[in-house]
Image (cartoon, rainbow, N blue to C red):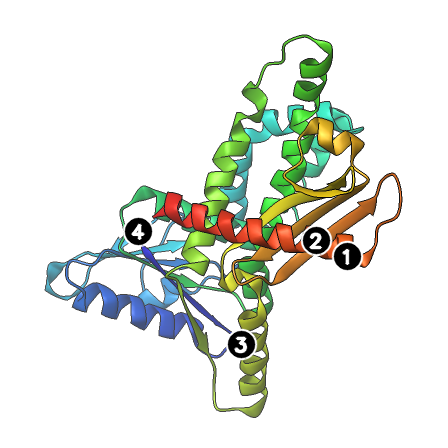
Amino acid sequence: MAELCVFAGKGGVGKTTVSSAYAVRRAVQGKAARVLLISSDPAHSLSDLFEMKIGDRPTPVALPGGRSRLSLWQVNAEKEFRAFLGKYKEALLDTVESGTIFSRQEIEPLLDTALPGLAEISALLAVERALDSGKYDCIVLDTAPFGHTLRLLQLPQQFARFLDFLDIAGSRDQILAAHFGGKVESGPQRFLGEWRAVVDSLRQAISGEGRLFLVTTPEKFSLNESLRVAGELESSPLTGSVAAISCGMVDGRALLDLDYSEDSTAEVDLNVVGTAEGKLVEVQGTAEHGTFDRKQLDAMLDGGLGAIRQLVEMQKAVLA
């Protein structure tokens, strides 16, 4: 997999200049290194810096010696997102409509609006496309100011939660058919596997061998902002691997990964998201048929975190 290098910082500190210099250096000095420099800032300035016209797809740059191992890409957020959504829109609408109380007519207008976080989503889609292409050894990402960067790095985890919701919505008809008879076409839900592959690829790129460069200036305000963001990134679970598991109390026993029959009779339903280091990211629990005590909660958490460590090892083995 290509190395991902993310340049982040306040507005006006020189992120584009520094990331561009880094990309050129990697392309010139690297041994046949193929480098892609992506700008995710809605206010693109790569074309001004390199004094050339750059389209909304990777554009080769002539380097000293006639070599052209560097490409530039100013991401068109709207176009990138619509192309991705257009491929899966029908399957997405079918899944949400069949598994929720919302109708297709209610959902479709939401997908046609300018969604919050469009620039960040599009930047990640561009990075994933570049990673998947196998054309580059190094991908350099010139980001928008700090707020955008933090949201960008958090998106894979948030997207994974959305996929969990879609997975549940899409499995409703299968569960009913399994218990009451009948057949259900699985076609509309096939896109979930493709979306999970996108999320896994981005998680590995960000949390694995990726590198983050904080660009700042000597001014106190800029330095303090960089230190604050560095602290947020250091404490973020996205700096390591993350996994999730369902837990529950069934007949007084703590069980993991409940199937339908266990889940329907569970006294307690608990979902745990955590890191390989045993730290919690999110816990959601409900007493379905009665209260539960601290000892039972600890039993479910201990079992869940132990399972998460195993899941992370399995993820690493599959992605290796």
**Which of disc 3 and disc 1 is earlier in sequence?**
3
Work out how far the residue at label 1 is from the one at label 3, CA to CA, in angstroms: 37 Å
Label 3 sits on what residue type? Answer: Ala
Residue 302 placed where, x, y %?
64, 55
Residue 115 placed where, x, y %?
66, 47
Residue 64 placed where, x, y %?
14, 66
Label 1 sits on what residue type? Answer: Lys
Q: Residue at x 45, y 59 (%)?
A: 207
Residue 149 placed where, x, y %?
54, 64
Front-most of 126 and 198?
198
Instruction: From the image, state whether disc 3 or disc 2 is nearer to you.
Output: 2
Instruction: From the image, state whether disc 1 or disc 3 is nearer to you.
Output: 1
Label 2 sits on what residue type? Answer: Ala
Image quadrant where residue 73 sits: bottom left
Q: Are marks 2 and 1 in contact (CB under 8 Å)?
A: yes
User: Do we see residue 112 in this rendering?
Assistant: no
Q: Please give the residue where the numbered disc 4 appears in the rendered image.
A: 59
User: Do we see residue 250 in this rendering?
Assistant: yes
Work out how far the residue at label 1 is from the one at label 4, CA to CA, in angstroms: 60 Å
**Which of disc 4 and disc 1 is earlier in sequence?**
4
Work out how far the residue at label 4 is from the one at label 2, CA to CA, in angstroms: 55 Å
Q: Please give the residue where the numbered disc 1 appears in the rendered image.
A: 295
Front-most of 289 and 81?
289
In this rendering, position of residue 318 left or right of residue 8: left
Q: Is residue 144 above or below residue 204?
A: below
Q: Which element is circle 1 on? A: helix
Q: Which mark is residue 299?
A: 2
**Which of disc 4 and disc 3 is earlier in sequence?**
4
Work out how far the residue at label 2 is from the one at label 1, CA to CA, in angstroms: 6 Å
Q: Are marks 4 and 2 in contact (CB under 8 Å)?
A: no
**Which of disc 2 and disc 4 is earlier in sequence?**
4
